[in-house]
Image: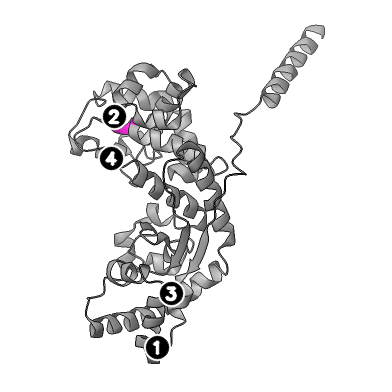
Amino acid sequence: MVVLMRRLIGIAMIVLVVACSPKKKLPDVSDIPMPLTLQRFDRDFFAMDTLHISTGLDSLQKKYPVFIKDYLYNILSAYPQPDSVLKDVLLFRRTYAAIDSAAQQQFPNFKKYTQQIATAFRYFHYYFPKYNLPHTIITYIGPIEGVGCALTSSGLAIGLQAYLGHQFPAYHTRYISEVYPDYETRRFEPQYITVNCLRNILSDFYPEKKAGTSLIEQMIESGKRLYVLNACLPNVADSIKTGYTQAQLNGCYEHEKNIWHYFIQNNLLYETEPTQIASYVNDGPGTPELGSAAPGNIGQFTGWQIVKQWMKKYPEKTLEQLLSTPAKQIFDEAKYQP
């Protein structure tokens, strides 16, 4: 009985120590000024009188002198002739009236997301103070098959048509299902807005380096990005940052060693042939070579774990130093052993 009590006390002490272990302290970014102006282009555009479209477009031109061109010619792909623009705008207005109604219901105001983006930007500025962050957020309604977020010369443009909830009927038409399969429309939820915005910022600051590189280098480059996203979005679930389901993410941690052994046993780490490594570093419905439950782009998970190990080994390294360190060097120094 005494022995049992000692064991129970020992277990309780371990639980207490784990529970009381301090989490990594986050930097205080509350004093970093981050004024963000929100412009609801979507509302202004759909508020135009369809009987006087030309006058309405003139008004939009005055209010959005730069973005209106991006919207008409890059987002709507309108033909740059006055008559054609009017016809394209009228057609889009009629076709997307229901999408606009759904967006206004989903986003009666955008304050919550503006605040989330501002907080993420504060962290990004803390880690990368030289980068010139945008100070304007522009919401718009674009074609469903278009992008949901884009960094423009006017500011950060967010296409609300891409965040209406994965069960929204328009996402499941035959045409859209061919453009965006289920594993992508699953992420057409509002909680992905801030992550996608920060991905755009990070891609602008640190463009992807894939061409001609090996699998291990591509995995680590993806791991760098996840590490930065994690630092700038500390309160966002890892499943949202990775794009995996929570079950897929749990499975990755549970089988971390097996995933690593698969890459080694199949001599894939230094493979550079795109067709041989694409399924491990590109988005997709899954990675069948690793089982039916494995997510697509599973290489980013392994790369993230390697980067974590490297940063743990060199805690004095900044995020700028992380991004500037060659992937091969990180791999050699991390000595990754799951």
According to the picture, the residue beneath numbered tag 4 turns out to be 279
Local crowd at mark 4 within 10 Å, few (<14), some, or many (≥20)? many
State yes or no: discs 4 and 2 in contact (Cβ < 8 Å): no
Compared with 113, 285 (above or below) is above
Magenta includes 302?
no
Q: Residues within 10 Å of mark 1 (few under 14, many from 20)?
A: some
* Mark 2 crowd level (few <14, some 14–19, many ≥20, 10 Å Cα): many
User: Percent x, y for residue 255?
Assistant: 44, 28
Q: Quadrant of the C terminus?
A: top left
* Residue 315 vs residue 285, the one in the foreground: 315
SS at mark 3 in the image: helix
Q: Residue at horizontal 39%, vertical 44%?
A: 202
Residue 50 tag number: 1
How crowded pointer 3 is (Cα within 10 Å; few <14, some 14-19, many 20+) is rated as some
What's the amino acid at mark 4? Ser
Q: Could you tell which of marks 3 and 1 lies nearer the N-terminus?
A: 1
**Is residue 4 shown left or right of residue 239?**
right
| Dot placed on the residue nearer the N-terminal end, 2 or 3 | 3
Residue placed under numbered mark 3 in the picture: 63
Q: Which amino acid does label 1 sit on?
A: Thr
Kind of residue sitting beneath label 2 = Glu
Mark 2 lies on residue: 217
